[in-house]
């Protein structure tokens, strides 16, 4: 057993320390994945800020949040500016905090009641029947080939799956930072080493 453990750790020690100089690639991948997510969410809110505030305010068909105008602006600009900061790897840890808050609000205020799955399981009999009925209506009354040209129709479950995924990615960035060699944060920390 000690021979196997020794063999394992000698191979481990020969390979993985060499990867240390590439450890900035993981935070870079997380950042680049999140940029379009938050850019689209933020800019869409900004473009329709009145509707966003109304949705935040309405307790019947919206979120029923207090101070909806303020929260709409905070959410919209946090997401849009956050996307730009993530793209640059600038203030990565700092911007992760308000983005984490927006994800927690989205998870609990918007998606929680819908369970886990973001997209409903089309293998479910109930979902398959509804999806089939929608496709039949579209084939009869619409240009179905044009409508499905860019992808298949799905039933949106709107669960917490994506929100939790983004939350985990942001928590990882909070602890890892923007990444070695691939972020403005890295070069600022080298330029101002006493400020770390």
Image (cartoon, helix red, strand yellow):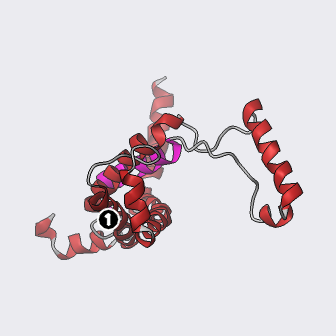
Judge left or right: residue 36 versus residue 83. right
Q: Secondary structure at mark 1?
A: helix
As rendered, which of 123 and 130 lies closer to the eye?
130
The residue under the point 82% across, 43% down is: 132
Residue extent of the magenta highlight = 160-177
> Residue at the spot x=30%, y=51% of the render?
175
User: Is residue 176 visible in the rendered structure shown here?
Assistant: no
Q: How many marks?
A: 1
Which of the 4 image quadrants contains residue 49?
Answer: bottom left
How packed mark 1 is, by other alpha carbons closer than 10 Å (few <14, some 14-19, many 20 or more), is some
Q: Visible in this render: residue 13?
A: yes
Q: Nearer the viewer, residue 1 or 42?
A: 42
Above or below: residue 44 compared with residue 109? below
Vertical comparison of 44 with 113: above or below: below
What is the x, y in percent for residue 142?
83, 62
The stretch drawn in magenta includes residue 166:
yes
- Extreme residue toward the right, this view: 140
Q: Residue farthest to the left?
A: 194
Name the outermost residue toward the bottom: 191
The majority secondary structure of the magenta stretch comes to helix
Image quadrant where one finds the C terminus: bottom left
Q: Which residue is mark 1?
A: 73
The answer to whether 115 is drawn above or below residue 36 in the figure is above
**Residue drawn at (35%, 49%) of the image:** 171
**Where does residue 148 sit, x and y in percent of width and height?**
79, 61
Q: Going by the image, does 161 lie left or right of 131?
A: left
Membership of 44 in magenta stretch:
no
Q: Toward which corner of the image does residue 110 lie, by quadrant?
A: top left
Task: Give coordinates of residue 89: x percent, y percent.
Answer: 35, 69
Residue for point 45% across, 51% down: 166
Q: Give x and y (percent) for residue 183.
A: 35, 70
* 34 relative to 87, above or below: above
């Amino acid at each position: 057993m000690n021979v196997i453990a020794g063999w394992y750790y000698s191979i481990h020690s020969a390979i993985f320390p060499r990867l240390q100089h590439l450890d900035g690639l993981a935070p870079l991948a997380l950042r680049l994945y999140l940029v379009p997510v938050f850019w689209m969410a933020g800019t869409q809110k900004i473009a329709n800020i009145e509707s966003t505030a109304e949705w935040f305010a309405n307790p019947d068909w919206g979120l029923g949040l207090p101070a909806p105008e303020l929260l709409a602006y905070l959410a919209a600009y946090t997401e849009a500016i956050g996307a730009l900061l993530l793209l640059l790897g600038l203030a990565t840890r700092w911007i992760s905090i308000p983005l984490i808050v927006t994800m927690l609000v989205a998870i609990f205020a918007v998606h929680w009641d819908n369970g886990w799955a973001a997209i409903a399981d089309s293998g479910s009999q109930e979902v398959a029947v509804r999806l089939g009925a929608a496709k039949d209506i579209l084939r009869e009354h619409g240009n179905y080939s044009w409508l499905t040209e860019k992808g298949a129709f799905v039933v949106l479950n709107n669960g917490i799956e994506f929100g939790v995924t983004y939350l985990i990615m942001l928590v990882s960035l909070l602890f890892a930072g923007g990444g070695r060699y691939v972020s403005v944060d890295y070069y600022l920390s080298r330029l101002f080493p006493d400020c770390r």
